[in-house]
């Protein structure tokens, strides 16, 4: 069991039998009220984010999350009903996760992408993408020479439908590296 002083950003905890990851934490103490911990937690199974306040005497269980390497195979369906299929690199077992659970991760998945599969009690519940991915630009407005009044940037769309701000020299068909943690352009693949 963990005290509130052990709960930090990135920790995996169990509440009401569900695994959560702490995305934000802030300790505060006001007068006689005692110590409190304000957090934002993300349900790893459903993708839902909520705020939770822990009080000084609260204890939580640390989630037993195991990580395995997996490969993204393909997506099925469209819109809200889209599902994503992965294969474990060691056991070759396939698992399917919904787009709702994966959230923004789907913007960085192309066939063959290696991800880290998060397993709770032996069941795959979510994935972590690599920190940097290479995506092909599918749509880029032409960069006009000398047009730096807007800071020299333009908005391009990648093969997954993800839009990102890039320098003016990026064109349709170029491959670019994206940081998946921040969702920002890193560099052009030469």
Image (spheres, helix red, strand yellow):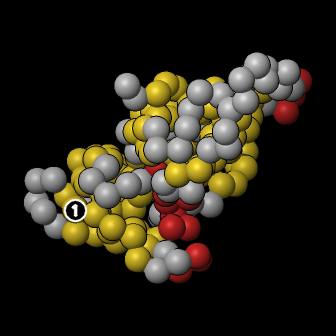
> Residue 163: x, y in percent?
63, 47
The residue carrying pointer 1 sits among few (fewer than 14), some (14 to 19) or many (20 or more) residues within 10 Å by Cα, namely many
Viewer-side residue, 148 vs 41: 148
Q: Secondary structure at mark 1?
A: strand
Q: In the displayed image of the protein, which residue is found farthest to the left? A: 91
Any part of residue 62 in sight:
no
Give the quadrant of the N terminus. Answer: top left
> Residue 124: x, y in percent?
32, 62
> Residue 115: x, y in percent?
32, 47
User: Circle 1 sits on which residue?
Assistant: 87
Q: Is residue 115 left or right of residue 153?
A: left
Q: Residue at x 68, y 32 (%)?
A: 143
> Residue 39: x, y in percent?
68, 40
Q: Is residue 82 left or right of residue 139?
A: left
Where 146 falls versus 114 (above or below)?
above
Q: Residue at x 89, y 24 (%)?
A: 31
Q: Is residue 52 left or right of residue 121?
A: right
Q: Quadrant of residue 145?
A: top right
Where 184 falls versus 79 (above or below)?
above
Any part of residue 88 in sight:
yes
């Amino acid at each position: 069991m963990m005290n509130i002083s052990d709960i930090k950003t990135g920790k995996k905890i169990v509440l009401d039998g569900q695994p959560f990851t702490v995305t934000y934490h802030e300790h505060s103490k006001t007068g006689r009220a005692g110590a409190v911990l304000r957090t934002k937690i993300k349900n790893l199974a459903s993708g839902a984010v909520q705020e939770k306040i822990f009080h000084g005497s609260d204890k939580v269980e640390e989630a037993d999350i195991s990580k395995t390497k997996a490969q993204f195979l393909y997506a099925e369906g469209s819109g809200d009903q889209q599902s994503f299929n992965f294969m474990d690199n060691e056991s070759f077992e396939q698992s399917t996760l919904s787009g709702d659970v994966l959230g923004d991760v789907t913007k960085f998945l192309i066939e063959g992408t290696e991800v880290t599969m998060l397993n709770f009690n032996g069941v795959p519940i979510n994935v972590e993408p690599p920190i940097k991915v290479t995506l092909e630009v599918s749509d880029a407005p032409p960069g006009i020479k000398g047009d730096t009044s807007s800071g020299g940037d333009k908005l391009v769309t990648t093969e997954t439908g993800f839009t990102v701000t890039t320098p003016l020299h990026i064109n349709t068909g170029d491959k670019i590296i994206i940081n998946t943690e921040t969702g920002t352009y890193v560099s052009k693949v030469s």
